[in-house]
Amino acid sequence: MAAVVSSGVERDPAVPGRGDTPPAVEVRGVTKSFGELIAVNDISFEVAQGEIFAFLGPNGAGKSTTISILCTLARPTSGSATVGGYDVVTEARHVRRHIGLVFQEQTLDDQLTAEENLRFHAVLYGVPSSQVDGRISRVMELVALSDRRRDLVSTYSGGMARRLEIARGMLHTPRVLFLDEPTVGLDPQTRALIWEDIHRLRHEEGVTIFLTTHYMDEAENAARIAIIDHGEIIALDTPDALKGSVGSDTITLETADDDGALTALRVAGYRVRRAENGLTVYVEDEEAAVGPLVATAGVPVHTVRVHRPTLDDVFLHYTGREIRDQHGEGGVPMFARAHGAHRR
């Protein structure tokens, strides 16, 4: 089944840096092998400056390997990649100075205060001493933790610690912030707060956000999504375009006279077929179509069910596998709705 892959970027005036500016991330034919295992297989894509870009895929799909290459923690077996205009192999030091990285697992020192953690990071990244206080205040404000800056990290909740890690990743004003599974294991309310922080970073600091996730609803925050499976990008586009590539919205009707409704709807020009329970009608916009559809059926309608294509449908469409049937390490579903996932 052919994948829909768009390496270009839709023009969006809300995204800083778009237009004729060079991409924040550029990957060309990158492959990474570990012996006979091919973890990443000949992938190519670009990320625009100021864009929120998501890698969506199951455990073991190649997301973390790609992040490791882009952050200079691993070398590609073949191909090339640049971040911030610098080659990840030959100019690794420059790349590191222009990126922020938030790992999936916490790396804060919980016996230090939030401010002490940030000051230590400032030293590591060579932030000029005259700028340190101002940057700490700024990033703590961006993640809404200003009132907890002098508290020990051991007193932080998991969500607060995650937000502090994002603040630390932004302290040295990186061009690109890499987030590896940024909200895994967090409750929905905390997850929403973190995404408020991320959107604020993008709008106020102009930073490019590159995240990996296996949460469908989290990926919806991105301007574009690359779905990766078995080390290959199988689809890349905006969330709406990906869902649109699967097919139309559908409305299922159960009526008092399905035969009569079927005839009336077909005469009116609707694309309709018999379903196991009732009739399925294919429409462009299910919200706008429900009222006219029920009126056109001309018979009493008992139930109406609407469905819009989801990213779950996209994954099924391009891989031929049900998301709920996939399992990752430890038997945890590879893909999960964020509200249903828990850290073990």
Image (cartoon, rainbow, N blue to C red):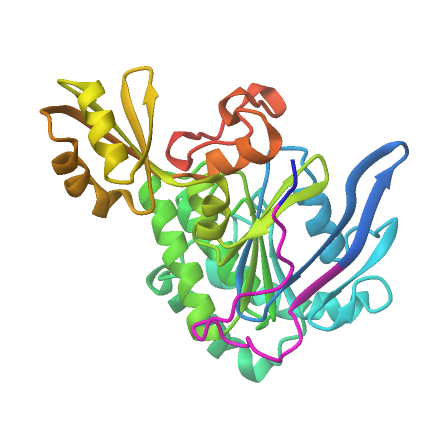
* Residue 149 left/right relative to 2: left
Q: Which residue is the extreme one toward the top? A: 276
Q: Is residue 168 visible?
A: yes
**Residue plotted at (89% across, 31% down):** 36
Place of residue 207 in the rendered image (x, y in percent of width and height, measured from the top left): 53, 69
Asked if the stretch drawn in magenta spans residue 25, the answer is yes
Place of residue 104 in the rendered image (x, y in percent of width and height, measured from the top left): 58, 43
* Residue 10 left/right relative to 6: left
Range of the magenta residues?
4-27
* Residue 27 left/right relative to 91: left
**Residue plotted at (69% across, 71% down):** 84
Q: Is residue 154 visible?
A: no
Q: Which residue is the extreme one toward the right? A: 35
In this orientation, which residue lies closer to the viewer: 116 or 302? Answer: 302
- Residue 280 lies in what quarter of the image? top left
> Which quarter of the figure is the N terminus placed in?
top right
- Height in image: 181 above or below 198? above
**Residue plotted at (45% across, 40% down):** 247
Place of residue 169 in the rendered image (x, y in percent of width and height, measured from the top left): 56, 61
Q: Which residue is the extreme one toward the front? A: 267
In this orientation, which residue lies closer to the viewer: 250 or 45? Answer: 250
Place of residue 188 in the rendered image (x, y in percent of width and height, measured from the top left): 34, 41
**Residue plotted at (22% across, 48% down):** 288
- Height in image: 144 above or below 296? below
Asked if the stretch drawn in magenta spans residue 301, the answer is no
- Height in image: 16 above or below 253? below
